Image: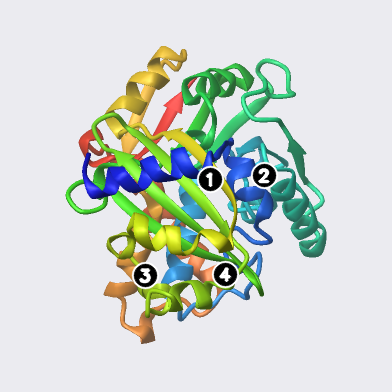
C-alpha cells in the first residue's frame, strides 16, 4: 500500500468516519456554497468582469439549450439559487429541489431578497422520489448536482419521469478526466468558523469514475492547522500529509466523515441517459466558454454597456453554440430530449 493509501487506511481504522450523503458531508454546513460571489444573486453584475460574462453565457446556455423560456422549470440541486434565481425572470416558474435543508433555506432567503416570487425551493431527502407528478416540467436544469446523489442513474430516471414529452434536460457534470495524472489525490481546507475548520481529502478513482472523500473536523482555525505544517492555508497540499502528522493533530480532531460519489464521464453519462429513457442525447459546446471567449476578443470600447445590451449580444451566439455538436470524450455539456 502506498503512502497515500496508508493515510486513508489510518483514517478508516483510527477515526471510524461516519458514512454520509453529500448534504450531511458538507452542504448543510455552508452558509454560501459559492462564497457569496455570484453575480446578480450576491453581487451587482459587472460588465468589466470576465467571470460575469462567463456566468451570463452559462445562464443563456441553460435557457436556450433547455428551450424553457416562459416554461415551467425544475432546477435539480440549486446550491445558492444558481441558475434558478437568474433564469426566473425568463420563465413562468422555477422549482428547485435539494437534499440539503440548508441549501433550500438559503435559496428561499435569496429568492425573497431578490423578489423572485416565481421561484420555490423544496427539500427532498437523498435518493427519494421527486415530489412531482409525471410529465410536470418543460425543462430540467442540473449544474454539477446529479453526481452528488447516492444513485445518479436512479436520479436520471426520476428526472426523465417528471419531464413532459419533448422536454429537455440540460446538464453540467464533474467528470474525473481532468484529474488524471496528478489530481487523483487532493485536499481542500475549509474555514468552517472562527475556531474550527474542515480538511477534506479526495481519493479519486479515474477509471472507476468514483471519488471517496474524507472530511476531518478540527477544533482549531484553518490558519492554526496550516501553521502546524509551516504553511498558509492556501499552500497546503496532499503531499504535506502523513500518518505521523495526522497523529500529531489527533487531539484537535473532533469528527470524521466519509462520502462516496459517482462521477460519470461524458460518454458514460450519454449511455445512462439513453438507458433512463431519453430518446436523444445531444453533447454540445457551451455558452459559458463562448461568452468568456467573446470577452477576451472584444476591445473594451466595443463591449456592451448594459446587461440588456449584453443579453442582446450573447443570446444569438449562445443559441448557435449550444446546437454545435461536441464529442463526448471531451466531457461536454449535454442536452437530453424526452
Foreground disc of the pair 4, 3: 3
Depicted 275 relative to depicted 179: above or below: above
Q: Secondary structure at mark 2?
A: loop
**Mark closest to the chain's N terminus, 4 or 3:** 4
**Mark closest to the chain's N terminus, 3 or 2:** 2
User: Marks 2 and 1, how far apart in space?
Assistant: 9 Å
Residue to which mark 3 is pinned: 236
Q: Are marks 2 and 1 in contact (CB under 8 Å)?
A: yes
Residue 41 left/right relative to 34: right
Residue 267 left/right relative to 170: left
Q: Residues within 10 Å of mark 4 (few under 14, many from 20)?
A: few
Q: Are marks 1 and 3 in contact (CB under 8 Å)?
A: no
Residue depicted at x 38% and y 38%: 211
**Image mark for residue 63:** 1
- Which quarter of the figure has residue 70? top right
User: Which percent across, then down, holds residue 96?
Assistant: 69, 40
So how many labels did they put on this image? 4
Residue to which mark 2 is pinned: 91
- Which quarter of the figure has residue 68? top right
- Is 97 or 298 nearer to us in this picture? 97
Amino acid at each position: 500500500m502506498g503512502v497515500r493509501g496508508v493515510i486513508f487506511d489510518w483514517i478508516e481504522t483510527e477515526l471510524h468516519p461516519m458514512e454520509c450523503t453529500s448534504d450531511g458531508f458538507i452542504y448543510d454546513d455552508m452558509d454560501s456554497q459559492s462564497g457569496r460571489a455570484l453575480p446578480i444573486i450576491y453581487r451587482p453584475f459587472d460588465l468589466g468582469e470576465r467571470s460575469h460574462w462567463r456566468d451570463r453565457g452559462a445562464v443563456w446556455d441553460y435557457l436556450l439549450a433547455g428551450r424553457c423560456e416562459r416554461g415551467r422549470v425544475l432546477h435539480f440541486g440549486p446550491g445558492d439559487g444558481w441558475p434558478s434565481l437568474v433564469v426566473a425572470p425568463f420563465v413562468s416558474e422555477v422549482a428547485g429541489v435539494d437534499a440539503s435543508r440548508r441549501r433550500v433555506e438559503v435559496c428561499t432567503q435569496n429568492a425573497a431578497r431578490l423578489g423572485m416570487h416565481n421561484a420555490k425551493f423544496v427539500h427532498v431527502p437523498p435518493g427519494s422520489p421527486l415530489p412531482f407528478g409525471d410529465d410536470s416540467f418543460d425543462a430540467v436544469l442540473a449544474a454539477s448536482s446529479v453526481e452528488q446523489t447516492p444513485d445518479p442513474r436512479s436520479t436520471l430516471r426520476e428526472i426523465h419521469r417528471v419531464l413532459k414529452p419533448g422536454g429537455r434536460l440540460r446538464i453540467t457534470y464533474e467528470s474525473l478526466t481532468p484529474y488524471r495524472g496528478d489530481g487523483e489525490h487532493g485536499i481542500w481546507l475549509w474555514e468552517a468558523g472562527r475556531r474550527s475548520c474542515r480538511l477534506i481529502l479526495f481519493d479519486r478513482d479515474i477509471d472507476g469514475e468514483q471519488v471517496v472523500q474524507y472530511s476531518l473536523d478540527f477544533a482549531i482555525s484553518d490558519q492554526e492547522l496550516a501553521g502546524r505544517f509551516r504553511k498558509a492555508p492556501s499552500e497546503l497540499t496532499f503531499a504535506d500529509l502523513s500518518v505521523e502528522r495526522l497523529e500529531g493533530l489527533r487531539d484537535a480532531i473532533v469528527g470524521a466523515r466519509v462520502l462516496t460519489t459517482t462521477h460519470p464521464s461524458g460518454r458514460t453519462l450519454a449511455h445512462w441517459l439513453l438507458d433512463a429513457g431519453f430518446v436523444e442525447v445531444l453533447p454540445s459546446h457551451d455558452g459559458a466558454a463562448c461568452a468568456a471567449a467573446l470577452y477576451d476578443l472584444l476591445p473594451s470600447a466595443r463591449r456592451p454597456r448594459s446587461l440588456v445590451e449584453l443579453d442582446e449580444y450573447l443570446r444569438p451566439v449562445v443559441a448557435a453554440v449550444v446546437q454545435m455538436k461536441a464529442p463526448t470524450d471531451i466531457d461536454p455539456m449535454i442536452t437530453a430530449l424526452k
